[in-house]
Image: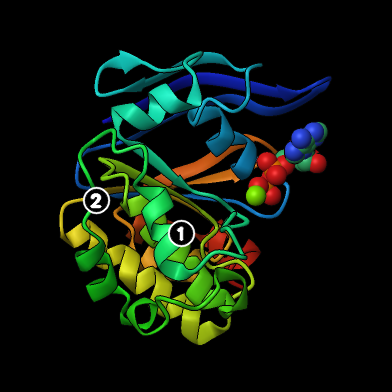
């Protein structure tokens, strides 16, 4: 579904992503694991057309998307849940959801199924987004992206800053979305929780992929256990 080959990305003179190749097959959850500063956000911004310096190839459903404008990429069926959630804090939960769907490029999203998946959003439909807890805001950010009816959902560190209970609940929702047929690219530092729900994963260190494999292979990998899981 998504095939990335030999991708290099810079921020000005800073070379951040180096010769990165990876893919996501239809129906998978693939996780790109990496510590702070590894280049995860730079990488997703590049997929979404937000970084214009990239070289290499990003193919989505057999078409090259590198160099296209963000709205064209969204129209092809990729939706991003951004790292900082980027909600409209002074607008209500329902208004944030409505805005997610206003492009209506892949057919209208179904707010009812989103509210079913995140019942707390239904309870708080009229509440201002800025007054929700971190976990609720993350759910709303995911819900808003789902209003685009994406074929591939890209989540940039959805567990960042959440309490352990919410981390579990947000990642469980991601797993449920995948069970309902959505393909997912997940960027995470939270290796254990992310691998529990993933099919495959890649480890990104200093902008380079250093380890890749099935989720189980990564959980069994001694280097990952020593460096990331403290085992
Ligand atoms: N807009 C930017 N301008 C310059 N450097 C940046 C910018 N965004 C990120 N960087 C740098 O790129 C590197 C990777 O950052 P980032 O992609 O945010 O990593 P991650 O999301 O994995 O924490 C870091 O060294 C960071 O300082
Ligand atoms: Mg980041």
Specify the quadrant that holds the C terminus: bottom right
Compared across the picture, whether 52 is left or right of 180 comes to: right
Q: Secondary structure at mark 1?
A: helix
Alpha carbons under labels 2 and 1: distance apart: 13 Å
Q: Residues within 10 Å of mark 2 (few under 14, many from 20)?
A: many
Residue 112, position as x, y percentages in the image: 21, 67
Res 216 → quadrant? bottom left
Tell me what residue is drawn at x 24 percent, y 37 percent: 25
Left or right of 212 in this view: 223? right
The residue shown at (84%, 19%) is: 13
Using the image, determine if residue 95 lies above or below residue 57. below
Q: Can see residue 129?
A: yes
Please state if 29 lies on the left or on the right of 53 as rendered: left
Image height check: is 75 above or below 65? below
Residue 11, picture quadrant: top right
Residue 173 in percent (x, y) is at: 32, 70
Res 109 label: 2
**Is the CB–ligand 2 distance for label 2 below 8 Å?**
no
Quadrant that contains the N terminus: top left
Name the disc covering residue 226, or none.
none
Q: Which residue is mark 1?
A: 96
- Of pointers 2 and 1, the one earlier in the residue sequence: 1
Residue 154, image x and y in percent? Answer: 42, 46
- SS label for mark 2: loop
Mark 1 Cα-neighbour bin, 10 Å: few <14, some 14–19, many ≥20: many
Where on the picture, by quarter, is residue 12?
top right
Tell me the residue at 36%/43% (across/down).
Answer: 102
Q: Among all residues in the image, which is located at the extreme left? A: 180
Count of numbered labels shown in the rendering? 2
Residue 183 or residue 123, whichever sits in front: 123
Query: What is the x, y in percent for residue 15?
Result: 75, 24
């Amino acid at each position: 579904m998504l095939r990335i080959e030999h991708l290099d990305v810079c921020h000005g003179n800073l070379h951040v992503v180096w010769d990165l190749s990876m893919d996501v097959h239809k129906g998978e959850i693939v996780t790109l694991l990496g510590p702070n500063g590894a280049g995860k956000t730079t990488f997703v911004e590049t997929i979404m057309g937000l970084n214009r310096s990239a070289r290499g190839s990003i193919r989505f459903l057999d078409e090259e998307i590198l160099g296209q404008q963000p709205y064209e990429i969204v129209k092809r069926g990729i939706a991003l849940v951004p790292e900082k959630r980027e909600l409209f804090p002074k607008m209500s939960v329902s208004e944030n959801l409505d805005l997610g769907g206003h492009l209506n490029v892949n057919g209208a999203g179904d707010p009812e199924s989103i509210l079913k998946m995140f019942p707390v959003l239904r309870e708080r439909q009229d509440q201002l987004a800025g007054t929700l807890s971190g976990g609720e805001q993350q759910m709303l950010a995911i819900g808003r992206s789902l209003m685009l009816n994406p074929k591939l959902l890209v989540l940039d560190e959805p567990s960042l800053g959440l309490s352990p209970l919410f981390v579990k609940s947000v990642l469980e929702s991601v797993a449920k979305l995948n069970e309902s047929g959505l393909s997912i690219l997940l960027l995470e530092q939270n290796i254990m929780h992310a691998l529990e729900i993933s099919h495959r994963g890649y480890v990104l260190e200093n902008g380079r992929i250093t380890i890749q494999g099935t989720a189980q292979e990564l959980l069994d990998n001694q280097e990952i256990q020593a460096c990331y899981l403290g085992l």
